[in-house]
Image (cartoon, helix red, strand yellow):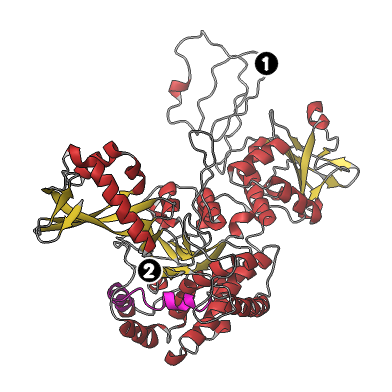
Amino acid sequence: MIYNHELGCMDVQLNDGSKAHDICSAFSAKKIIINADGTTNLYICVNDHNTLYYDFELPVTLLADTKELHKFLLDQRLTIPIGFSGWTNVYLINNYHKLSNSRKIEFRHVTLGWQKSVPKNQPRLSAKTQKSPSSSTSNYYPFLYESNNINGFPSYYAYDDFEFTRGSEQEYKEFLQNTIFPVPTLSLALAIGYSAVLASRLEDITDCSTMLVNICGSSSSGKTTAQMLMVSPFANPSPKGRGLFRTFQATQNALLAGMGEIHGLPVALDDSSTTPNANFTNLIYSLANGHGKQRCTANGNLQTSQSWSGTVIISSEIPMQEQANNQQGILARILNLNDIHWTPDARTSNLIKRTVKRCYGHTGYDFAQRYCDDKKYDELVDKYDYAQQRVHDLMPNRDNLSDRLEALYALIYLTIQELNEYFVDLQPNLNPDELLKIALKTEQESVVDRDIANRALDFTSEFIFQNRLRFNEFNVQKIIGYDYFPKTRMNACGSLLFKANNRLDVYISEKTLKDELLKEGFGEYRTIISRWKERGLLLHEKNRNTERMPKLQGLDRSFLQRRYIHLVFMNGIKDLSEDDLYEPDDDEIEQPNNNGYEPVPEQPNNNGYEPAHEYTDFPCNECMQPEDDDYPLPPEDITEEYPATRRIVK
């Protein structure tokens, strides 16, 4: 086949030396495209008789099958007569060899940021010999972006609709210098965005794949504006654009799929409050772990799951862990920045939004390029160690999670230091200690509250108070032996022992306690019990978590045979003390619990006569008696105790 440039058509040189003219529109392969999954395409350009021009990609595997190739070309509006199909295969194969020999090869990458794995069919130099343009000795670690040059071959991002850059870089830098750097909260927001580069690059050092930052607070506190600022150095920050700003108006699988193969660029997820009844436990763990679920193919082979790393910024009106299970692993994976007013006023907020929508995608890629070679990486590791020590000094209130959170905050601290170096011409003069104190305020205030044993004890106390009727009650005073007034109940889940000096001993069924904690999302039952034992809150028999109750008068024998979780509250429980327990005098008749209402006055015994109509708690006294004598009262006294506002009948 011969390309006829003059007429814009294809001619064929026949075996007898003659030519078949204009068998179809002119077409030829211009370059070889190698995709990230290893497949190879030919980039075909079509000239339809010098009037219409278009292009498409042809999988090279079709060159082995003439019929399939012919069908594919027909779909692309290339109507080649069936008798010339064989000539088409030969023509395209020759095109492929010419392009390969002339190194007209182009790659497509689906990864944004640090290249964590080598795509199939990508040409590499020998192991660890890929050189940085600025060094002849350092190994080079590419940061993939809109377009890159890898070993002399161009590589482009596979998704054409992704919006990387817009506007003027000079205008963007002036915006940072005049609007962002003078405001501490906005400088902190910018540093959180840039921290994605270092969080992904130092993944092996920090043992953290993805840093989750939850900025929460009331409406109009600048959360969305701060998120847009965080992602603006790398791509389109608009919620309506095709960039790094996403919303929670999607399924969990869709959110994770959108994170796929992003390593070192910040991703903003706006307003988790739009899904108020969701449980974010699985989402938090998946995002922090940096990869999706492992799945198998129909043949049982393991599929390659997507991965990601860097920084994910989630905005919400309430902390995300309040919409997740009560697990310490959740608290160790999220940096909470609560109640921060990110923008000083509405005018500044509007200015930020307008500017970052007009100018974005500047400085982020250049910032990442500073850490591509191993020499700079080694320096970065040393700086990170120093940053972690500084953060340690800024966190005086500590618990068992502080070391893990410290490693994450150190990334933000290090980023602030690096921004001072990168923007040295703009003289940002950012103070890492002061900016990090803003981020650490919430963390330091929550050290006591986030302890899982304390939170579980608070929940257990509330459960006991709200379910008091499910417990036997004993007022135990050490005067002469034991003197107690019991309130025993059928099917009780435990007992309350009110002792001297406001001490309260609670014996609660282990199954009941475990089930209630699990319902509330406390999945670390063993950890909770272990910490209660360490702090002396739980008394137990040797090598057990439980113990039997003491022998108390009026207590059913079956209660004595069971073992219970024995919790000790030395100062009692709020709103639950022995003062609330009814203590009658020796000559006083027990009255029912009327829940705050006046007790019903006792009525005389009429021994079969019509009872007096003096009941104060019924609207109609006459209607309480039958019209005939079919229902006489029994001859002996019977006392019935009715709940709430009902009466006592004798």
The magenta span reads: 349-371
Q: In this orientation, which residue lies closer to the viewer: 315 or 500?
A: 315
Query: Amino acid under label 1?
Result: Glu
Q: Residue furthest top?
A: 630
Q: Earlier in the sequence, mark 1 or mark 2?
A: 2
Q: Is 457 a magenta residue?
A: no
Q: Quadrant of the C terminus?
A: top right
Q: Position of residue 552 (x, y in %)?
A: 83, 35
Q: On the picture, is 350 further left or further right than 553?
A: left
Number of the front mark, 1 or 2: 2
Judging from the image, what secondary structure is the residue with disc 1 in?
loop
Q: In this orientation, which residue lies closer to the viewer: 59 or 436?
A: 59
Query: Amino acid under label 2?
Result: Ser
Q: Position of residue 43 (x, y in %)?
A: 29, 56
Residue 206 versus residue 247 in the image, above or below = below
- Residue 222 visible in the current orientation: no
Residue under the point 53% across and 59% down: 117
Residue under the point 51% across and 47% down: 304
Q: In this orientation, which residue lies closer to the viewer: 249 or 129?
A: 129
The circle on residue 147 is 2
Judging from the image, what secondary structure is the residue with disc 2 in?
strand
Tell me which secondary structure the magenta stretch mostly adopts: helix
User: What is the crowding at mark 1: few (fewer than 14 residues within 10 Å), some, or many (at least 20)?
Assistant: few
Q: Position of residue 294 (x, y in %)?
A: 54, 44
Residue 145 versus residue 28 in the image, above or below = below
The circle on residue 636 is 1
Q: Is 353 a magenta residue?
A: yes
Q: CA distance from mark 1 to mark 2?
A: 98 Å
User: What is the crowding at mark 2: few (fewer than 14 residues within 10 Å), some, or many (at least 20)?
Assistant: some
- Residue 573 visible in the current orientation: yes
